[in-house]
Amino acid sequence: MKKLPLFIFLFIVLILTPVALNLYYNNQLKPPSTSDTSQIFVIKPGQPVIQIADNLKEANLVKNALAFRLYVAQSGIGKTIQAGDFRLSPNMSSKEIAKELTHGAIDIWITFPEGTRTEEMADIIDKKLNSVENDKYQFDKKEFIALSSEGHMFPDTYLIAKDATAEEIAERLESTFEEKVDRKTLLKGAKNGLTEDQVIILASLLEREARSNEERPVIAGIILNRLNIGMKLDIDATVQYVKGYDSANNTWWPQVTQEDYTAQKSLYNTYLHVGLPLKPIANPGIESIRAAAEPQDTPYLFYLHDADGKIHYAKTSEEHTKNIQEFL
């Protein structure tokens, strides 16, 4: 008889407790409400599951954030949850919501890095939207490139609809440029003899040449110094722009050789022609635009980056040659 209480205790601990916990867990995965009123739930790029779960609980879309996280971990779908916005309702179970987050995005986050060219943007959009899970795809790369204004397609992170057309996306990026780029900033270029368009052209060069915000105004000053004395700009990025897509290395910014400096016949090639290129070679961000509008007054005419990315300036061609020998 003394063994009976021990048996009951073990039965409760080993059998009933796990059953109770399992029942509780499954109950917490049930819909938090019977309401079918939908709402838009947004997941940002790189957002961790723990934050997603907390946000779902705060929006009353799941009963228990921890239970949602456990289900995601057990089902192994954590890495397949998309960034974007989703139409969800509180009458959906946590399992249904988790599944929806892996393929049901209405809009998709698309990031355009600063310094990307229009064709590059078209590739990024196509890669993001043209998937087997998107039966609403209608983006046309050639149309986007034709409609885009190089230099004015603002590089940023956008929520783009799965069924967005080339015209809609092009208009969105250009209107964002108009919203974020203060015309007063562009007009500051007049102090250095630059039109608004030339400020954007110069900014596009800075975006490809500078590696930090500290460098941008100095390099802008160097380019301005060259323009003022009628010296060729000799900027590799302009040659890269002319060369276009390098299919062997899968890049729009290919390596430039000594031969390319003279072989790439184009008015954009600043090794062959004095002055700024005809138009921007990429889409610059705010910092490059500000630096182009207000270059730093500098005595330098040359610059280079060493293997570690550190920049070295020079006032004369002799100093620059010495830097090349020492740092490259």
Image (cartoon, helix red, strand yellow):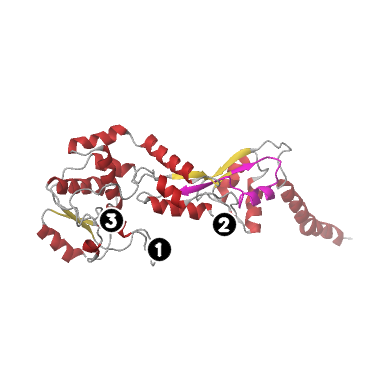
Residue span colored magenta: 86-111
On the image, numbered disc 2 is attached to which residue? 79
Question: Residue 50, percent across and down?
Answer: 57, 49
Quadrant position of residue 59: top right
For the residue pair 47 and 149, the one nearer the viewer reads as 149
Circles 2 and 3: CB atoms closer than 8 Å:
no
Circle count: 3
Task: State the SS at label 1.
Answer: loop
Q: Earlier in the sequence, mark 1 or mark 2?
A: 2
- Indicate the quadrant containing the C terminus: top left, top right, bottom left or bottom right: bottom left
Quadrant position of residue 172: top left
**Residue 125 lies in the magenta stretch:** no
Residue beneath the point at 41% across and 49% down = 145
Task: State the SS at label 2.
Answer: helix
Query: Does the image show residue 2?
Result: no
Task: Give left or right: position of 251 versus 91.
Answer: left
On the image, numbered disc 1 is attached to which residue? 250
Query: How far apart are labels 1 and 2 at the CA level?
Result: 26 Å
Residue beneath the point at 72% across and 50% down = 25
Task: Give left or right: position of 326 versus 165.
Answer: left
Q: Residues within 10 Å of mark 1 (few under 14, many from 20)?
A: few
